[in-house]
Image (cartoon, grey):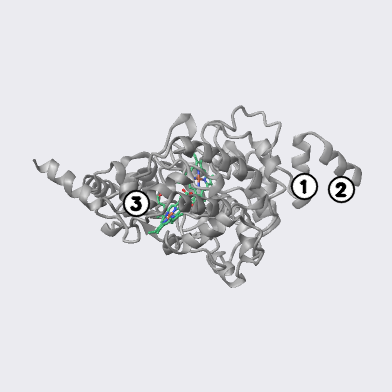
Amino acid sequence: MTPSLLLSIRRGPLRSWFSGALLLSCSATLPEGARADDAHKGGAPHGAMPMADQLAMASPWLKPSVGVPPGVSPLFFQSIVPAQLPNTEAVVALGRALYFEPRLSKDGSVACATCHDTSRGFTDQRGTSEGIGDQIGKRNAPTTMNALFFQTQFWDGRAPTLEAQAKLPITNPIEMGQPDGDTAVAAIAENPEYQRAFQAAFARAPNFDDLAVAIATFERTLVFLGAPFDRFAQGDASAISDDAKAGFALFNGKARCTACHQISGSNPIGSDNRFHNIGVSARHQDFEGLVKKGLLALEKSDSREALDELALQTDLSELGRFIVTRNRSEIGAFKTQQLRNVGVTAPYMHDGSLVTLWDVMDHYNKGGEANPFLDGGIEPLDLSERELDQVVAFLFSLTDDRLAAQNRAEEARQRALAAKQRPMRDEALATRKKFLFEDRANHAREGSK
Ligand code: HEC
Ligand code: HEC
């Protein structure tokens, strides 16, 4: 590429600027679907940023291949990345184009990036997600940033790998709605640029398995671990505020967060990869009734696709991990979510029911929500208002520097909202003047009258 062409790419309109960015990192040209002048209407329903703008915003952040991130133990990294990973720039570039490709959905309107929008912390910042035909699901979209570090994917861990995960939204009826993988492939396979990109990546024609591998390989480049907290952990005492430091001490001590969210070089995202009932869904559930319904549904089918539909389209969603394992101790249990970049991924929890990080802290401070399956690690914390603010300040220090501006704006937005409303706050419970099990016993007594 000549220098003058490079210049015109940098200065030119969005489309050539982005195609150029891809060209620079990969010999394959950009498949049609992800182009800024995309003739497709839609491509960004549900308030998502248009695909081309997302790409333009994110491309300086995106890496051309998968590599050990700074601060992460190489041995640990090897252990979480498949040995056979086809880690070439052609595979990553193809995966990137597919991630932003609305044509993979039945009506050409929804891409991965509709719900995992790069301008919204790689999520949709909605309570629960909305797919094709404005259909609303039961679960909150977690971020795809750092998803590579999880041992299982989804809130209930029903997908063992990123590859297995990537296929499910494409064929889920309310997400991207394709009848099957082959139909999804057919929607892009005629396109000569995709044909070339698949050849460059896998040396064969487009197929569903390779498509999932490409998307998953691209996702393994989405490492966002460069936060002020990391500079603090490396010895720069001025990297985070005194409040955030005090919050970190509380996080490890009185607030008991590390019991499940430990953060370290071999656990950079702060998830124990286990499943706990912390009482989020207990607010409005009759678990025993749901379990009966769940077991009946599983008798009909417990295929991966069937589990996906139970989780996203039915009330059984609230059973969480139980639907996957049928283990009664996992009723209402969900995967410990990562804490990286939580500043920019509101609202929170598997159902998106907690709107700010202050709500999250109020939930934990009062000991969760009473239910017979509540994890033993959840109990009233007796944190003062000042201490709650400090833990929140620490949580906002976990956002990668590339998202620093969004993080600041979001902190201000949440602070203003929390000043007006704190629906989860319950001082009597937090300070143990009242106990959750008493509530439960009293309700049972009222019920038997
Ligand atoms: C309609 C919105 C929507 C679309 C489209 C969508 N997702 Fe998701 N995604 C979600 C929701 C909701 C969840 C959580 C579902 C659950 O856990 O049961 C999720 C979960 C995930 C996870 C698991 C992360 C974790 O922390 O466990 C990954 C990875 C992911 N999606 C990647 C993708 C990819 C890749 C695509 C495109 C092939 C895609 N998503 C398309 C909404 C969507
Ligand atoms: C017993 C284990 C456990 C403890 C202790 C715990 N968490 Fe969690 N955390 C979880 C689980 C499980 C989820 C997901 C629950 C759900 O969605 O139903 C979660 C979710 C979260 C989320 C939401 C993340 C998102 O993207 O939606 C935040 C924030 C969070 N925890 C912060 C904390 C903080 C701060 C503490 C300490 C005050 C703490 N957690 C203590 C297990 C735990």
Gap in Å between the C-alphas at discs 3 and 1? Answer: 56 Å
Do we see residue 86 in this rendering? no
Ligand 2 quadrant assignment = bottom left
Q: Amino acid at mark 1?
A: Leu
Give neighbour class at mark 1: few <14, some 14-19, many 20+ (Cα, 10 Å).
Answer: some
Residue 299 in sight = yes
Q: Nearer the viewer, mark 3 or mark 1?
A: 3
Q: Position of residue 135 (x, y in %)?
A: 44, 32
Query: Mark 3 = which residue?
Result: 430
Q: Which residue is mark 1?
A: 23
N-term-proximal mark, 2 vs 1: 2
Residue at coordinates 39% horizontally, 42% vertically from top-left?
312
Q: Is mark 1 within 8 Å of ligand 1?
A: no
- Residue occupied by mark 2: 1
Q: Say which label, 3 or 2, has the lower sequence index.
A: 2
Q: Are marks 2 and 1 in contact (CB under 8 Å)?
A: yes
Query: Which numbered marker is on residue 435?
Result: none
Among all residues in the image, which is located at the extreme left?
Answer: 449
3 and 2 marks in contact (CB < 8 Å): no
